[in-house]
Image: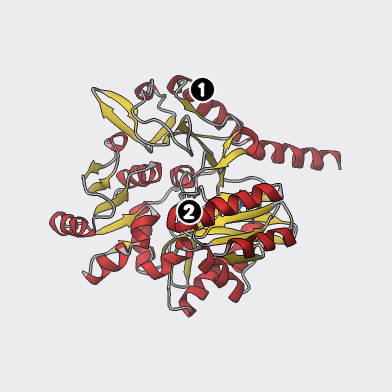
Amino acid sequence: MNILVVGRGGREHAICQKLSVSESVNNVFCAPGNDGMKGDATLVSIDEMNFSALVEFVEKEKIDFTIVGPENPLLAGIVDYFQERKLAIFGPTKKAAEIEGSKAFAKQLMSKYHIPTATFATFTDLQAAKDYVEQQGVPIVIKADGLAAGKGVVIPHTLEEAYRTLEEMLVHKRFGEASTKVVIEEFLEGEEYSLMSFVNGDKIYPLAIAQDHKRAFDGDQGPNTGGMGAYSPVPHIGEDVIDRTLASIVKPVAEAMISENRSFTGILYAGLILTTEGPKVIEFNARFGDPETQVVLPRLQNDLAQVIQGVLAREEVSMEWDENVMLGVVLAAKGYPNAYEKGLVIEGVSSISEDAYVFHAGTKLKDGQFLSNGGRVLLVGAKNTTINQARKAVYQELEQVSTDAFFYRNDIGERAIKNVSSSFERTHTR
Ligand code: AMP
Ligand code: GLY
């Protein structure tokens, strides 16, 4: 098979890497990709949003199917565009991708079909939103309705901060069109986890779960980002919780999408929180998560191209997972998720040990040297028998690539270590 991956980040690098080791795959192309992926894919310099040029390429190169990484082309209808031309593509149609594209749509869908999530209300009017916040109290969660690359969520702990956030979003349009409407939700507490599933209508093929780290700084401080690091599996989220999540959330939502005439095919990403009342939805995405994909796909033992082909054909597909833990830490440019510089020299990428993975997110090669070309620059990951060992390996490698121009979180995986050791203590003191 020849496969085209659309996108340019660390997620797409992980997808290309997995496809490049698939026995059933001859050529992996990535449009537009980034320089750091060159060992795993042939780069095609076509922008994600240039659908006609992508179709022309697919027809010329006899691509068997296309996988779409990011949300923007999905929401702009890339899948519809390919399907109208009878080209195989793995991803949701524009109507189905709305589950990510509008938080208000996703919340209304969940409320109509009784899918557990935080109670909420949506607003376009500033005064009405302020009144609601005053009545609900803080902490409270304020989300831009549309796409904001993971950054459109603010959790104010004072009323003043809540009012300021609402003004910034609704009046000053901090996230442009995406924040002309806001969703205000109840603040939930519990352990977060991400469950991605391949979905084709009512057929669901769950992947291994992961835990992301959304805040910029150690100890979950600082602004929300696209994700600063992840690991898989998540030892403190048991099989019973995953089963419950599938039964009470993933299956009903896939069925709800069919009932709403928005049948979903592609990767349905559920961002979840385990509350005292059970699993609840924080958000849905209509694609692979980033950075979750970088720690989940390396654990997949099957041929990814065959798995996706099986899903597209609605066949039975069983996936096996490496029992080792995969942990990855994102190296970001200082300033991210706000303004940051590009073109900064990244040290020592080529001398990273063979036991570690590097997935490039925003890098560029110039005169044989990698320069940064985005906020999230790359992810260093390692697989090992324990989370502690995987962590050690990753942080050791990061020391040689990071300089003053970059930052990374030092506490990726700590929650798992704490949770596992406290359950160990519980069992052993009983
Ligand atoms: P989202 O972009 O919707 O995934 O939100 C980003 C992050 O904000 C999540 O990963 C959570 O850490 C936090 N968050 C979002 N919604 C809630 C909520 N209702 N209660 C508590 N935390 C939340
Ligand atoms: N890591 C969260 C996301 O991909 O949206």
Number of other residues with Cα within 10 Å of mark 2, as a class: few under 14, some 14 to 19, many 20 or more? some
Residue under label 2: 173
Give whichever of 323, 27 is nearer the camera: 27
Task: Decide if residue 93 is in sight here.
Answer: no
- Specify which label sits upstream in the sequence, 2 or 1: 2
Residue 386 in the image, given as x and y percentages of width and height? 59, 34
Residue 193 in the image, given as x and y percentages of width and height? 59, 51
Which numbered marker is on residue 121? none
Number of other residues with Cα within 10 Å of mark 1, as a class: few under 14, some 14 to 19, many 20 or more? few
Give whichever of 157, 19 is nearer the camera: 157
Q: In this view, does 77 lie above or below 2?
A: below
Task: Decide if residue 370 is in sight here.
Answer: yes
For image coordinates 51% across by 43% down, the residue present is 225
Amino acid type, label 1:
Gln
Which numbered marker is on residue 396? 1
Amino acid type, label 2:
Lys
How far is mark 2 from mark 1, CA to CA? Answer: 42 Å
Q: Residue furthest left?
A: 60
For image coordinates 27% across by 29% down, the residue present is 365
- Residue at disc 2, secondary structure: loop
Q: Which residue lies furthest to the right in this view?
A: 430
Residue 342 in the image, given as x and y percentages of width and height? 36, 31
**On the rendered structure, is 83 left or right of 71?**
left
Q: In this view, does 89 lie above or below 255?
A: above
Q: Image quadrant of residue 113?
A: bottom right
- Residue at disc 1, secondary structure: helix
Tag in front: 2 or 1: 2
Residue 68 in the image, given as x and y percentages of width and height? 34, 55
